[in-house]
Image (spheres, rainbow, N blue to C red):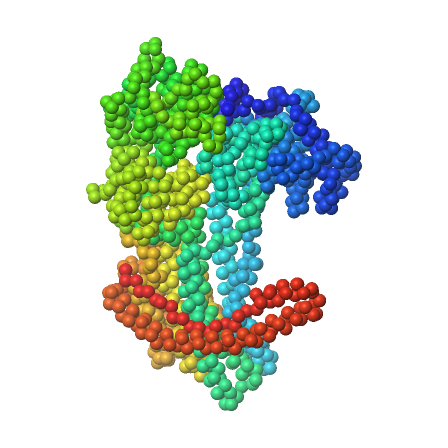
Amino acid sequence: MLTPNENRQEEFLNPFIGNPANRESSVSAGSGQTDVSLAQPSSLSLEMASTLSPNRLSVHNGPPRSSHSSSPSLGGETLRSRADSTISCADTVVRSRANSAATTTKAVYDDVSVADALNPDARNEDDFIVQDNKFAFSPGQLNKMQNPKSLAAFQALGGLHGLERGLRTDLTAGLSVDEGRLEGTISFQEATSSGNAHPKHQLSSITETPASETGSQFEDRISIFSQNRLPARKSTGFLKLLWLAYNDKIIILLTIAAIVSLSLGIYETVSGGSGVDWVEGVAICVAILIVTVVTAANDWQKERQFAKLNKRNNDREVKAVRSGKVSMISIYDITVGDVLHLEPGDSIPADGVLISGHGIKCDESSATGESDQMKKTDGYEAWRQITNGTATKKLDPFMISGGKVLEGVGTFLVTSVGRYSTYGRILLSLQENNDPTPLQVKLGRLANWIGWLGSGAAIVLFFALLFRFIAQLPDNPGSPAHKGKEFVDILIVAVTVIVVAIPEGLPLAVTLALAFATTRMVKENNLVRVFRACETMGNATVICSDKTGTLTQNKMTVVAGTLGPKSFGQDNNSSSSMTATETFKQFSSRMRDLIVKSIAINSTAFEEEREGSKEFIGSKTEVALLQLAKDYLGMDVTAERGSAEIVQLIPFDSARKCMGVVYREPTVGYRLLVKGAAEIMAGACSTRIADTDGSNGIAVDQFTQENSQEILNTIESYANKSLRTIGLVYRDFSNISSWPPSYLKPSEDDSDVAQFEELFRDMTWIGVVGIQDPLRPEVPTAIEKCRTAGVQVKMVTGDNIATATAIASSCGIKTEDGIVMEGPKFRQLSDDEMDKVLPRLQVLARSSPEDKRILVARLKHLGETVAVTGDGTNDGPALKTADVGFSMGIAGTEVAKEASSIILLDDNFSSIVTAIAWGRAVNDAVAKFLQFQITVNITAVVLTFVSSLYSNENQSVLSAVQLLWVNLIMDTFAALALATDAPTEKILHRKPSPKSASLFTVVMWKMILGQAVYQLAVTFMLYFAGSHILKDHLSADNGQKELATVVFNTFVWMQIFNEFNNRRLDNKFNIFEGMFKNYWFLGINCIMVGGQVMIVYVGGEAFGVTPLNSIQWAVCIICAIGCLPWAVVLRLIPDKPFGIALGFVVKTIALILRPISKAFGVVGKMLKSAVRPIKRVTKRAFSKRQEEHIGRPDEEAAVLTDLSRQKTPEAPTTSVTVPPITITTS
């Protein structure tokens, strides 16, 4: 039970703040003034002090050593060697005294003795050693309380008072905002000793924290105890990224071939042969280097962008008490010694000890693995039970970072932050990269399949050229070195085909699109926590949205009210100051006092000074009520809360939709105040206030059916005006001396409080207020956009059905054939009945979080892709169940944020529509790149294959260096260009894609196959007939090389122009829409154009090209630009006939390849069977060598044998599987 505290400061003292009756001292860190009233120490605490304190004279404030300690790593000599010799000698003397007095008896409430409770751990010994420590404790000692939870450590540190003195803070006023560098020090003995051992002036001198003109805020605290942030995960260095980009078997094989080619070329040059044979080898090496550098640069940039997003994602604000005032601070600014507030839904940001609280229960499963709700006891009560000998292991005053507050409110003292905290240590050991998204996984599989096809083509090409090379050897007049170089050239061509065929850019395209989209989405108030949600949101079909703050502005104002028999603001729906003032003037002083206490005490919002003026911070509903009481009743919230003696607090619960408080009322005994949903409040009343004026104060009469209906009519009239209705009720408990009364059933968890169900009956009706929360002006337009995009919007709210229907109708959610239901009726439906109702259900009123979860689950069962919004702790299950969960960045609890995929930074529904657009843009970007790259793959592989077989020199018309340039264009440049298109308004003018949709649509296949046919036709025409077409424009001595350059130049320019075609995925013709807004696209194309022109003019021997004249350039550009009108022709082809024809061709090919696949599978199994005996013999030989030559014992040899079995690779299975190809016709 809390007692009044006359010395409370400012309005930060909420009903749950204040010192327990057994509080023993108060130190004002801000002023340095001390008010000491220390109780006489118990024999246990005196024995503890005499036993432990001498060991704290070392420079590191080290832990006590028990007499039985024998571990060299924990002994006094090891720790003492780190201090100077003088301190070390003193430590030696006093430790011998401590050893004779120390007790090693384990406490009944802990598994270790008090003497051993603060001994350092072998792995964290450095955390106990602090140079120039101005505090009594080291980070390691403080961490011993929570890792694991230890009441013995709490006792060894002197309880809350020891922590208060040792950390130089104040449990009431918190840290001083003026604290910089600290003066003086405090020893462990001074902090943990009890009684009057320390005079008042001495205690003041060691705890005051004067302002410092030099040094930053909390400089000494941060220096000793660190900041509340984890060391950033060491980013991968650019050189390592370069190595990872290069560390590909195919690239390495190509490098080896290039080096061999270079060596042979140099040999030929030195031997008097051609002087340019070495150039191709150098060019390939340079091209490999460029590709690797560009890939590494992309990865480096991507990592930096994701690191920024993660930093923004982890930041949030918490309520802290500093200099006697509550303020919002970033979790990164929390430091040891801070006093923080706790409310339901909070995620605990640091380790600490509970100072005071009401009914606090926490979920610590994320930090400790314990699934049970952990009931918390404040530190004062824990100390009382420890000193009285009644403490048990179940006593838990410890707040564990990473835990979630499920129930209750209170304050706690921060003792460990950042890497020293429990959750910080866990996160440091778990830091990992982001998992691949579903689209990345799907594209990775596609890339592997395409790579296998390309590899198969390359192998066939290699052997075909090799057989021809061997057949021509007898007639080959070249030197051995020249013949060797020809063989290497064949190998290079085959390997290069594999490099080009493998679409490594597919996963890169997803990564780039996600990085670009998520970065831009932050600017549009969408903070993406789970990257796969960005993809999924593009295909969302249903949005289940809250009302308050999402559809409305969350700027609440009391505009109407009926309190007792008096009303205001009903006629004009506005709170005219005269009307409200005149109404409240008619109330008696007791009635005004009752209303003020109903609003001020029964609230968790607080008043804070911002920019020179005071404003209320907290729940918008509570802020509206507090503002009403302040403006019209002259309420001083600080005075009201400071004078109230709170005995029980009932936090808000979304299931019961109310909150309450019990306080001592001098005139009656104890009074319960409850506020919440008006119709629920009315249902619990048996009496009402009938008269509020005159000298009698308040007159109460019984509820009748007539006046009950009158109240319900008032509530409905407010609701029909789209007002949120809040009811105020109370109940008096007279003639009792203590709380709770004996006739009320106590809570199962705490005998000092009564069950809410026992309290909440026979209430007296005070009145109802109507709170206006205006609709966001952009919401109707956003809802219409959702409807155009094929996305249903359903409103799920806790408001009554009349208010919900009015809001839904005004914003466009509710249509004529739509269904409106209440949560209690909805949850009673069977699954089949729900499935019939859901397609037309548009509003779910008076719903609980469980109703929302059921709604989401049933919608997913029907095949919908569901997005849901949530702001409360109980919304967590619904947010997790949904395909995409949106939490509120302003009004949302930390539990809701951690359960969500995307955080709405402005709590605005229109931001959800923005997320839909960006999600579709990401999916479109990948489809555009896929369409582009598959076209290049088909064309390049076929062109290389055919031209190599046709050439007598076994050379492709596109050299290895040229193919690497093409690979750079299609893998990196195109990914950058096509993945950075921002969404347009028209992206919402189509229906979402179903979950079963294929990666390829009919339109995409039209463009891929049609453009591949055109490009192959053009390149083959130039390759085979170019000498006739350009016969008058080719030089006599260099004509063949010029023709090869024309083919290469035309091929690259076709890819550049086709990139414009791929900016659209539909059959519309405007491929330039929004192009000039995408500076990435324009810049990348300028680079590609400039690079190609430079290659043609200065590439020379390196690229195997020669400069072209104007006619040749004109032929290249005209042939290439034909891609654009050809795309128009392709878009005019009807999709349905094309899809039918394509499906027939695919099935025919599958029938042909299926027997071949089975044959290869049989061969693979035979090879595996043949290799298995050889493997076994190898394993035995390996194991025997390990045992005989290394000389390990038998058991270790057995372990090595097991390891060899794990590491010996299986023989590869040769199996060709034809994947199914789905044709999507829409």
Residue 572 lies, in percent from the top left, at 25, 25
Image coords of residue 311 (percent x, y):
50, 45
Where is residue 85 shown, x and y percent of the image? Answer: 78, 38
The picture quadrant where one finds residue 1186 is bottom right
Could you tell me which residue is drawn at 46 percent across and 32 percent down?
748
Q: In this view of the protein, which residue sits in the foreground, 557 or 53? A: 53
Q: Nearer the viewer, residue 376 or 717?
A: 376
Identify the residue shown where x is 24% and y is 65%: 1136
Q: How many marks?
A: 0
**Residue at figure coordinates x 30%, y 48% from the top left:** 831
- Residue at 43% from the left image edge and 31% from the top image edge: 651
| Residue 169, percent from left and from top | 59, 29
Question: Image quadrant for the C terminus?
Answer: bottom left
| Left or right: 1149 as drawn, with respect to 951 | left
Closer-to-camera residue (32/533): 533
> Taking 1095 as reference, is 690 above or below it?
above
Query: Which of these two is toward me, 164 or 876?
Result: 876
| Residue 445, picture quadrant | bottom left
* Residue 575 seen: no
Looking at the image, the residue that sits furthest to the top is: 695
Residue extending farthest bottom? 474
User: Which quadrant would residue 436 be assigned to in this image?
Assistant: bottom left
Position of 749 relative to 937 (above/below): above
Q: Residue furthest left?
A: 816
Q: Is residue 72 visible?
A: yes
